[in-house]
Image (cartoon, rainbow, N blue to C red):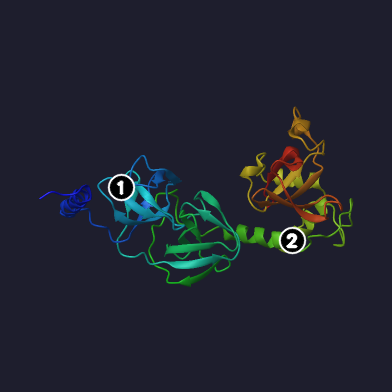
Amino acid sequence: MQYTMKQRMATATLTAALLFSSISVPAALAAQAGEVQSGVNMRSAPSTSGSIIRNLKKGEQVTIVEKINSYWYKITDSSGRSGYISTSSQYIELQSSAPEQTGNATVKASVSFRKSASTSGERIRYLKKGEIVTIVAKTNSYWYEVRDGNGVRGFVSTQAAYLSVSGTIPDGGTGNGGNGGGPVTAPDDTKDESVEKMIAAGMKYLGTPYEYGSDRNTTTTFDCSDFVRQSFLDGLGIRLPADSRQQAQYVKDKGTANTNWRALERGDLVFFMSYKGTKASSYNGIDKSSQTITHDGIYLGDGKVLHTYSNEGGGVTISNIEGTHWEYRLVFGGSAL
């Protein structure tokens, strides 16, 4: 019996299908949580030739959908993207296959996000008002272990002023975890809360006209130091010195001065020298430590400062620091608390 070319191809295809159907393939894992142990590439295919979707960072949580073979897992990350990563324990640690019991929380006011359940734990960053976090466990009376939107785990205060909690909160967590050590201590929420009260007091004056040498007994106009002083007075009942140079000395005396604005914390005061131009080159060769302080404001985080400097600038306003003359003029910043 002779076969046409089309018949031969059909027969070959059927034979191959039957042959490969007898080969066992790795069983899929039940969906399981995993924690990234060190930076690893998430790829578009289970092969080193697969394009890199992104690099997963240490501490990120992922869901393992399937074990493709001895070398590759299929996963989804916290944003729902799918891809493939190495099965090596160097990169991924499998967690209990039982579903993790968690609660959700909305951040009500900016709060420290730390590497351990202690005020001595390194601050990862400040969580911002409106962020959604997942509560993994209530570590103790003072601290929640939480996971942020990027899958990073850390610890925040249990105080109701900072988180609005929903769902079931598991007990027990990982405590200090080994991510920063230190004894379990009550969070330094007093300072965080004070910062937010002071900033809220200052924000009420947005748009208030500028006046150099403004009357310290009224709030109808402000110059820079009068505005900073009034924010502390209204928000915290703290009466700072009357002008920017005295306020700068006040911060210096507390030992918190830092010349790198990127290292400053929300609520720190920032101090500037005189304006000499909009370009960085205009400030080359200047010893800023010897410059007279001529302006100050309140650092909001994320490279923004709340201050007032002219009516043309909008009176009390918020300005960006990075890449502007404010960055080039900065002498130092630090906490007045």
Near mark 2 (Cα within 10 A), the count class, few <14, some 14-19 or many ≥20, is some
Extreme bottom residue here?
167
**Front-most of residues 51 and 166:** 51
Q: Name the one closer to the observer, 39 or 199.
A: 39
Q: Under tag 1, what secondary structure?
A: strand
Residue 184 at x, y percent in the picture: 45, 56
Reading the image, the residue beneath label 1 is 72
Q: Are marks 1 and 2 in contact (CB under 8 Å)?
A: no
**Residue depicted at x 50% and y 62%:** 133
Element under disc 2: helix
Residue 159 visible within the image: no
Single out the residue that lies furthest toward the top: 285
For residue 281, what is the image quadrant?
Answer: top right
The residue under label 2 is 203
* 180 or 325: nearer the viewer: 325
| Gap in angstroms between the C-alphas marked 1 and 2 | 52 Å
Crowd band around label 1 with a 10 angstrom C-alpha radius: few (<14), some (14–19), many (20+): some
Could you tell me how many numbered marks the image carries?
A: 2
- Residue shown at 76%/40% (left/top)? 325
Left or right of 184 on screen, residue 306: right
**Front in this rendered view, residue 269 or 301:** 301
Amino acid type, mark 1: Trp
Q: Amino acid at mark 2?
A: Met
Q: Percent position (x, y) of residue 235?
A: 72, 63
Q: Nearer the viewer, mark 1 or mark 2?
A: 1
User: Residue 139: image x %, image y %?
Assistant: 42, 62
Give the residue at the far left of this rendering: 1
Task: Determine the residue positioned at 71% across, 46% down.
Answer: 251
The numbered mark, 1 or 2, whose residue comes first in the sequence reads 1
Q: Is residue 108 visible?
A: yes
Residue 34: x, y in percent?
A: 35, 54
